[in-house]
Image (spheres, coloured by chain):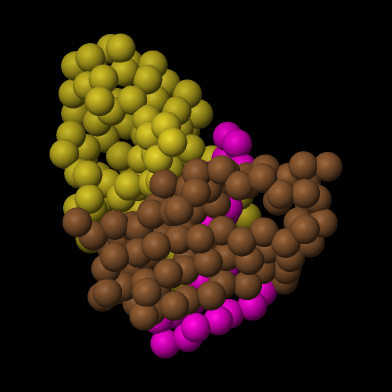
Chain colours: A brown, B yellow
Amino acid sequence: GESVGLHLPTLSVQEGDNSIINCAYSNSASDYFIWYKQESGKGPQFIIDIRSNMDKRQGQRVTVLLNKTVKHLSLQIAATQPGDSAVYFCAESRSGGGADGLTFGKGTHLIIQP
Amino acid sequence: NAGVTQTPKFQVLKTGQSMTLQCAQDMNHEYMSWYRQDPGMGLRLIHYSVGAGITDQGEVPNGYNVSRSTTEDFPLRLLSAAPSQTSVYFCASQPGAYPNNEQFFGPGTRLTVL
């Protein structure tokens, strides 16, 4: 079926290193993708988004890459900090990010080691 | 602005009981949504609304009702609680369609059905 999922459930990196979190999607009709960060006991927080007519978008310390050929999305976090420890979700939309639905992946738990 | 607020934070119900989860936003956002998050899972869309008086079903609507009589409020009703509805419930709002579509999530309501 159509789904959005993540390759690894847990990713452990050293503080100061770069992190790469991957996501695979199967719905070729998806036209909008978002990365969320969720800290323990809190709601998801928007990090960065990208539309399907782009292959790269940069924010502050974060970069999202989209490869439509292989239906792959990644989130790169530069110089990871202890505050980056959280679960990261990718989500996709078939309506350009409208309210009618984001489909979320299961999440990757990013652990920052000192 | 308080953002998106949810009450209660925690709730325990017995099977068959009914209750309403409250959600309010003070950002004048048109779109609002309800998600549930089960352990180790991503969020799944229950119901959503694109404006006052307009609601629609998401991925997992069974057992839940919603209404949107005002822009600010979007309550979620459980008609007859079942153990399968034990979950964390998140309400979200967004200004509208892309590019003003960043979703803001509330802190969540943790519901246990015995």
Residue A70, image quadrant: bottom left
Nearest the viewer among B14 and A63 is A63
Kindly give the residue lying farthest to the bottom in the view shown: A53
| Image coordinates for residue A75, horizontal then vertical, percent | 57, 65
Q: Is residue A37 magenta?
A: yes
Nearest the viewer among A5 and A42 is A5
Query: In the shown orientation, is residue A4 left or right of residue A56?
Result: left
Magenta stretch bounds: A36-59
Q: How many marks?
A: 0
Q: Which residue is located at x 42 percent, y 32 percent?
A: B39
Q: Which residue is located at x 45 percent, y 61 percent?
A: A23
| Image coordinates for residue B84, horizontal then vertical, percent | 25, 25
Query: In the shown orientation, is residue B31 left or right of residue A107?
Result: left
Q: Is residue A47 magenta?
A: yes
Tell me if residue A15 comes above or below residue B95 in the rendering: above
Residue B89 appears in the picture as rendered: no
Query: In the shown orientation, is residue A38 left or right of residue A61?
Result: left
Q: Which residue is located at x 67 percent, y 59 percent?
A: A19
Tell me if residue B58 comes above or below residue B15 in the rendering: below
| Image coordinates for residue A99, horizontal then vertical, percent | 33, 64
Residue B57 appears in the picture as rendered: yes
Quadrant showing the N terminus of chain A:
bottom left
| Image coordinates for residue A2, horizontal then vertical, percent | 23, 60
Q: Which residue is located at x 45 percent, y 53 percent?
A: A7
Quadrant showing the C terminus of chain A:
top right
Nearest the viewer among B50 and B46 is B46
Residue B60, image quadrant: top left
